[in-house]
Amino acid sequence: MTSDTFPSVRLRRLRKTPALRDLVREHTVTMNDLIYPIFVEEDVEEARPIKTMPGISRIPEKHLAQEIKAIYADGVKAVMMFGVSHHKNDTGSDSWQTDGLLARMLKTAKNAAPELVIIADSCFCDYTDHGHCGIVRDGHVHNDLTLENLAKQAVVAARGGADIVAPSAMMDGQIAAMRQALDEAGFTDTPIMAYSSKFASGFYGPFREALEVDLKGDRKAYQMDSFNGREALRESLQDEAEGADFLMVKPGLAYLDVLARLREQTLLPLAVYQVSGEYAMIKFAAQAGAIEEKRIVRETLGAFKRAGADVILSYFARAIAREGF
Ligand code: PBG
């Protein structure tokens, strides 16, 4: 006689030893799954530590080649690159100049470590003096004018050596506009990683310091309301229909429901971004002795996998490559 309940069922049987637990573990996280975001600053001599992100510094452009080699040697396999521009204006035009920071840093990184996957964050907030993710007209970010610039920037990024472009501006139609421009320029094989379900989030706080973004107002007219789950699915599925090769949920931990629901609705690879504020919360809590950093990192990345992520962007990626967890 078998019964499907206690005492014949004892779930603890498979938890008895470390080897047994390893055997039945449902998910793993390896360096194959991680993308390390980096910040590259032009016209400076020294690396500048970011106070609200302990352990993370802006990399001076002139040290970029050597830093990229070191990051690759540590075992990181993919980086997401952000520029810290000293040539900001109202359109962010430096980002689509062939000799601008974005083009230069991608080229330098690709040459320094050809095997490293180089991903270009495709947006304007790092390059505009008002800090918005596009062209401002009458107090609003103008969707369709911004699309034209995103298309130009995508081609410059691909020419510079980006293996993937990753639009994060949250303009409607941005995937289609970039896909068309890339295809017309001959970059039919350059994938688009869409920041498809991106929320207007307080968790981006430290990132603004990292990039010296002096944002006037907020991004609520283009990034999503944090209370909306169904709309997040619509956003991602639109991007898929426009030709995205990856979808993304951002931030991570507070949006696991979106990730899990999206997993049920798409066959595309799914990325999740453990953003600057999530990093900062773990770092500062660990520094205060409240939690163990490595355990929490492991647990949060495991949660992303469980919820359905294939790829995780995390500022912990380099430390994990060096020290494991
Ligand atoms: C730019 C962009 C942001 C982040 C990634 N790309 C900031 C924002 O939208 O305000 C945030 C990343 C992080 O906080 O780690 N559009």
Image (cartoon, rainbow, N blue to C red):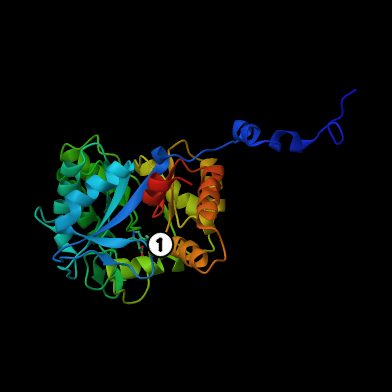
Furthest-right residue in this view: 1
Q: Quadrant of residue 241?
A: top left
Q: Residue at x 47, y 67 (%)?
A: 284
* Percent x, y of residue 293: 51, 57
Q: Residue at x 13, y 65 (%)?
A: 43
Label 1, ligand 1: CB separation under 8 Å: yes
Horizontal side of residue 213 vs 9, given as left or right: left
Q: Is residue 155 visible?
A: yes
Q: Is residue 220 visible?
A: no
* Percent x, y of residue 233: 49, 50
Q: Nearer the viewer, residue 98 or 117?
A: 117
* Percent x, y of residue 90: 19, 70
* Percent x, y of residue 232: 48, 54
Q: Amino acid at mark 1?
A: Ser
Q: Residue at x 35, y 42 (%)?
A: 244
Mark 1 residue crowding within 10 angstroms, few (<14) / some (14–19) / many (20+):
many
Horizontal side of residue 302 vs 277, given as left or right: right
Q: Which quarter of the frame holds ligand 1?
A: bottom left
Q: In what element is the residue under mark 1? A: helix
Say which residue label 1 marks.
276
Horizontal side of residue 66 vs 262, given as left or right: left
Q: Residue at x 32, y 41 (%)?
A: 77
Furthest-top residue in this view: 1
Q: Nearer the viewer, residue 190 or 79?
A: 79
Q: Quadrant of the N terminus?
A: top right
Horizontal side of residue 86 vs 121, given as left or right: left
Q: How many marks?
A: 1
Q: Nearer the viewer, residue 227 or 214?
A: 214
